[in-house]
Amino acid sequence: MKKKSIILFSLFISSFFILKAEEVKTPVKSEITEVTVFSNNAQVFRTASINVPVGQTTFVLSGLSQFIDPSSIQVKGTGDYIILSVSNQMNYLNQQEKSKEVKTLEDSLEIYSDKLAYQQGLTEVYTAEKNMIIANQSIGGSNTGIKMDDLKAASDFFRTRLSDIKLKELDIKSKTKIIQEKVTSFTNQLEQMRSKQTSATYEILIVVSSKIKTTGTLEISYMVTNAGWNTAYNLRAENISNPISLEQQANVFQTTGEEWKNVKLTLNSGNPSLPGTKPQLNPWYLYTYNDYPTRNYKKSKESYSKIMQDAGGENASYEEPKPSQTAADYTNININATSFEFQINLPYTISSDGKTTVVDIQQYTLPATYEYYCAPKIDPTAFLIAKVTGWDAYNLLSGNIQLYFEGTYVGESFIDINQTNDTLDISLGRDAKVVVERKKQKELNSKNLIGSSKKIDIAWEISIRNTKKTPITILVEDQIPISNDKEIEVEKGEISNAIYDETKGSLKWLFTLDAADTKKMNFSYNVKYPKTKILYLE
């Protein structure tokens, strides 16, 4: 008996020390205070307050995004304690917290589902009453007659009550249809939003040690995918005499499963997902191959992007009210060695629903000269071009641009900062007040047979008319065909003082056209080729 007591006591002591040795995990509530968003991902910064007991403690931050990059987790703290280790794990039992939108939709769906059930219950009640009335229409016995007054009263009752029930059924059917549409809408929206929620969450475990009971803070940062931003612009030009106003904006989005509520937002132009290892340039060995002739196809010049007609007109001068402020007035720009970033000094909330949040970054006033461009062979329309100089001194990124000219939206374009030109050309759209016409000079066109060859003479006239109230500068471009076939001979004729590029066959006229004035340019050429061949010259 004594031996058995010693064994039980030993087992008790062993269990006690095993429980002491196993660390108790202490949950810690943290909040996101700052987010740095890159083009493809984001760095999240969290803070947490902790109460540190004597000894070793494992603090657990749970409910985090499952899209965390484990290698990017960094932890530091303040207080009289030591951080011993940091680890991480997935938790498939605790799902991420529902967003405010999901909770609202679930509440709305529950309310309308109850309303639907109520209407369906009323339908059942009235149907049962109608069936009961129809089943009990017989009055009087088989051997007794019925008085006329009783028959009339019974008929009035059946007619009135059945009519009332029918009206009730129609009313219920109408209400049920409306409620059912609401239920379907809420259900579909919920399914879409729930599909973006993850079925698992991330946990960060931080083991600390302290000789005294104390308090402190933890600062945690990590990288997440499923987040990013891209730039967009609004360009406003009041007329062709003033500088242009360029508003730079950021389209920020994320589906990380975490709600970024009232956070300090920083937008970085870099992409940390790209490899950081420098490239290795290997030797370039030359080899010879058999040379086979290939046909040379020429591409026609593409027309400008399609935008709204008539960007012309003159604005009357007026005194504008003082504009309201935007986030661009609270943005600082930091230029790093390999990127630059915009620090937004206003709190922002970015929901984890994939919807774009527009953040104003900067506003610029850029010096510009204005010039019209027209290629009437492709499109007999004059396009207004803003030629922006010194653009490379600003922190611009490639992106879509919405165009506004003289207070009217005229279309969409694109800023490509990868171009190497000193001048950035931005199309402001079509101007119907610059009238362009290109037509053949029939009296100068001819076809002749010379021996075994056919010779065709072609002449064109381009007319530019400025119906605006101010002079304009315009660049007109056309072309003369060039031959890569020795059997085809092309001879240039009149070109009206155009700048001619023999290698490309291009003709360019750059001139200033006064208000209400017209200018005509003529050019011609002839083509000689074998009469047995077919050649398209239009």
Image (tube, grey):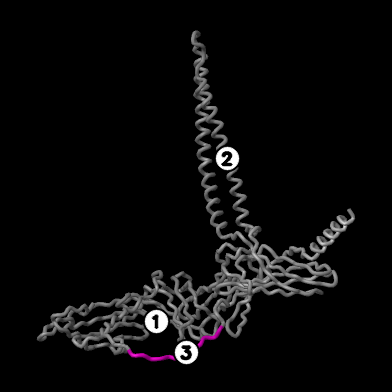
Report the disc number at residue 472: 1
Residue sitting at 86 percent across and 55 percent down?
A: 4
User: Would residue 497 be counted in the magenta stretch?
Assistant: no
Give the percent coordinates (x, y) of residue 261.
66, 65
Vertical comparison of 140 with 483: above or below: above
Please state which amino acid type lies under the numbered disc 2.
Answer: Ala
Number of marks drawn: 3
Query: What is the quadrant of the C terminus in the image?
Result: bottom left
* Of the image marks 1 and 2, the number of the one nearer the N terminus: 2
Pick the residue in front: 38 or 9: 9
* Secondary element type, mark 3: loop
The kind of residue tagged 1 is Ile
Q: Amino acid at mark 3?
A: Asn
Is residue 90 or residue 137 the one in the foreground?
A: 90
User: Residue 282 shows which numbered tag?
Assistant: 3
Based on the displayed image, in which of its 4 quarters is residue 360 positioned? bottom right
Label 1 to label 3: alpha-carbon separation: 53 Å
- Give me the residue at 47% from left, 81% from top: 241
Q: Quick one: SS at disc 1?
A: strand
Magenta segment includes 278: yes
Mark 3 neighbour class, 10 Å CA radius: few under 14, some 14 to 19, many 20 or more: few
